[in-house]
Image: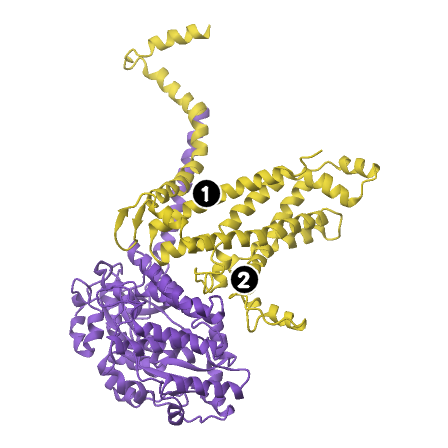
Chain colours: A purple, B yellow
Amino acid sequence: MMHNSRRGRLLALAAVTTLALGVTAACGSDDKPADNGGGSAAAAEPVTIKVQTFGGGKNFGYKEAIDKWNASHKDIIIKEEHLTDQFEQVYWPQMIQWLQSGTGAGDVVGIDEGGMGLAKAHPEWWADLGEYGLKDRQANFASWKWDGGVAADGKVFALGTDIGGMSLCYRRDLFEKAGLPADRDEVSKLWPTWDDFVKVGKEFQAKVKDTKFVDGTNTLFNVVAVQEAAKSGNVTYFDKDNNLIVDKNPAVKTAYDFAAKISQEGLTAKLRNFTDEWKTGMKKSQFATLGCPAWMLGVVSGDDAAGPDFKGKWDVAAVPGGGGNWGGSWLAVPKQSKHPKEAAAVLDYLTGQEGEVSVFTYAGNMPSNSLAQQDPAVQSAKNEYFNDAPVGDIFAKSASSLQPVFLGVKHAQVKNAIESVVSAIDDGSVPYAQGWQKLVDDAVKAAG
Amino acid sequence: MSVNVDAGRSTQAPLPPRRGHARRPQGRGFLSWLDLKAAPYLLVSPYFLLFLIFGIFPLGFTLWYSLFKFDLTGTEEWTGLGNYTALLSDSAFWNAVVNTLGMFFIATVPQILLALLLANALNKRIKGQLFVRMGVLLPLVTSVVAVAVVFTQLYGRDWGFINWMLDWFGVDPIDWKAQRIPSWIAISTMIDWRWTGYNAIIFLAAMQTIPKDLYEAASIDGASRRRQFWQITVPMLRPTMIFVVLNSTIGGLTLFAEPTTFYGGNVHGGTNSQFQTVSMFIVEQGFREFDYGYASGAAWLLFLMILIGSLINFLLVRRIGGKK
């Protein structure tokens, strides 16, 4: 009797469990009816392509391009998932885990230049874009940008989105307040060299008490590092055989010394770039200038950074010390994507002329696609937010001459370690005298 | 007697069972065995199975991989105790240990004292008793990250509420994230805000089980309220105290969410790792540097640290009220 009633209970339990599973499974399978107003009975459910991006402000600048696509396409819907502002510290480690474990990554993912060394070394992570006809796109790109997206085994896995031509953003209203010229050509003449820049900074701070001249050490450290890299064989932390050369490369030391100098001179607001405090700092006018690769314009004008209140108050001038190429990204399709064909189509659109022009006019990121660079809408573009600065003229004209900086397989990790130290000398947690040694030590550790 | 009976049975047992004939009694024996012997184990087994899968297995797996140089994106080679010797001479690891212990100390000592006093206050007859007691527990319901986000803003260097208040007293703004001790204090307040009420309620529950006549006898003998608290309440709370202290030790030494959120989700714990805890160090090594073996070794050292810490605290707390 007893075991009978228990068996009955077991049966009931099993039945309930099965039912529950059945119900959840049913819920899972039909949560979105396939009806997008097509009217035809056989209308297929639209494929949603998830595009994962990173970066501050307007980041990849895809908002308008995606809205436009979604308005005109019924079969493929693009959904952007902006994961974080921080590439090296948050986005890329997470992405590597997803890629390695085979689940979690989007259908199209953005990769910063710092991650491309590792991405190339892992062809097994990526779908072959050649299979979807994107090999034809080679003619659109400078050879280095194209080669960046070719994996170790020769397959094309990523196409370039943007490149990082260099400028210096400044607050014209604050410059006026300091009695400095506010016009961009005259401002550019103020600082042919970084020494001049520091001199102007001191002059500025003598007049304007509540605002520092630059944000922190990190941004200009990166700017100077890529400028100097051009003088030492286009390498920064790694040589072209992937050996760590942080301690030997004069470019890194020069950049570090400059970072230490502006901090010691008290020109920094001691804000680390891409943190919340840094973005608040823009809203509160805590600093007057910012090293600006083209994509930085989109960061500054983004709602969570300086935002609409400062429209027309920022402007773009020439950077001291000549051009440079900092940043720029690629888009790739992970092998784990269930819709690689549709993902490739989206990638083709976003890196194509139409998509890139939209990005440039919306956010300011300089297209790496040469057709987009030559597009009259880009060449003649003025950036309304930056007081109608002729950004087409500033960035597009120099785009074709930009030199790539070689970045090693572990660049992202090393960069992260180095930037922490460069910020640490600014906030005082590492004394200036110990900074360089710690930078080298931590870089060695991160590369090891 | 029983020896004889058993012996008789055991000689029979090895005989090959005759089919058909033996089935029925054997079947019944199986069912009763299932009922009496196996069922209890079956019923408690889900917990132990889960513990095996999510507790023991990862522990063993971590131990195994701590013996390798294992790069998540590349090679895997045996190093024996290499990771451990490297860790013990790694200043970054020791920095994380010091931070963890420092924050544990700053957070836990006031937290437990405060919880004790709070519980004592709540134990008195006050108006709106239930409401007040619930209120004390309320911080526990909020998410750790939400707490950390709000506190991070309060502790902002330039526009934070705390620095603004300090300014009234002529104190210069403190860069809470850049300096070591201020960052520890900031993080400790987040922990205390969340956990003091929880511990207070546990203490309160224990206080209510203390017999009233002890207090009555003490008052008749002329013991003051304060003396009653330290000489009756606290010693009687000893078992609860052990639980609370061990719980806080484990929680404090595995601290992760608050300091990570305090630095915008970055596990480096400040520009110079001023507030990087051992847990953050493990994540940084394992999932930022992708050095799995090294992170596994650090995880085992953390485990040992918690064991030692718990043991020390257990021995300390056991002495409470030990003297007559």
The percent coordinates of residue B29 (x first, y second) are 39, 18
Q: Which residue is mark 2?
A: B183
Most foreground residue, A344 or A388: A388
Q: Quadrant of residue A220?
A: bottom left
The three-letter amino acid code for the residue at tag 1 is Leu
Q: Quadrant of residue A382?
A: bottom left
The percent coordinates of residue B70 (x first, y second) are 30, 50
The percent coordinates of residue B90 (x first, y second) are 40, 53
Q: Earlier in the sequence, mark 1 or mark 2?
A: 2
Crowd around label 1: few <14 · some 14–19 · many ≥20 (10 Å): few
Element marked by disc 2: helix
Numbered label attached to residue B304: 1
Q: Image height check: is A423 above or below A227?
A: above
Most foreground residue, B94 or A292: B94
Crowd around label 2: few <14 · some 14–19 · many ≥20 (10 Å): many
Tags 1 and 2 on a common chain: yes
The three-letter amino acid code for the residue at tag 2 is Ser
Residue at the image position 32 percent from the left and 17 percent from the top: B23
Most foreground residue, B81 or A81: B81
Element marked by disc 1: helix
**In this view, which residue lies farthest toward the front?**
A433
Describe residue B138's horizontal placement relative to residue A27 as left or right: right
**Number of numbered labels in the structure image:** 2
The percent coordinates of residue B174 (x first, y second) are 57, 69
Marks 1 and 2 sit apart, C-alpha to C-alpha, by: 26 Å
Most foreground residue, A142 or B28: A142
Residue A29: in sight, yes or no?
Answer: yes
Chain containing the residue with disc 2: B
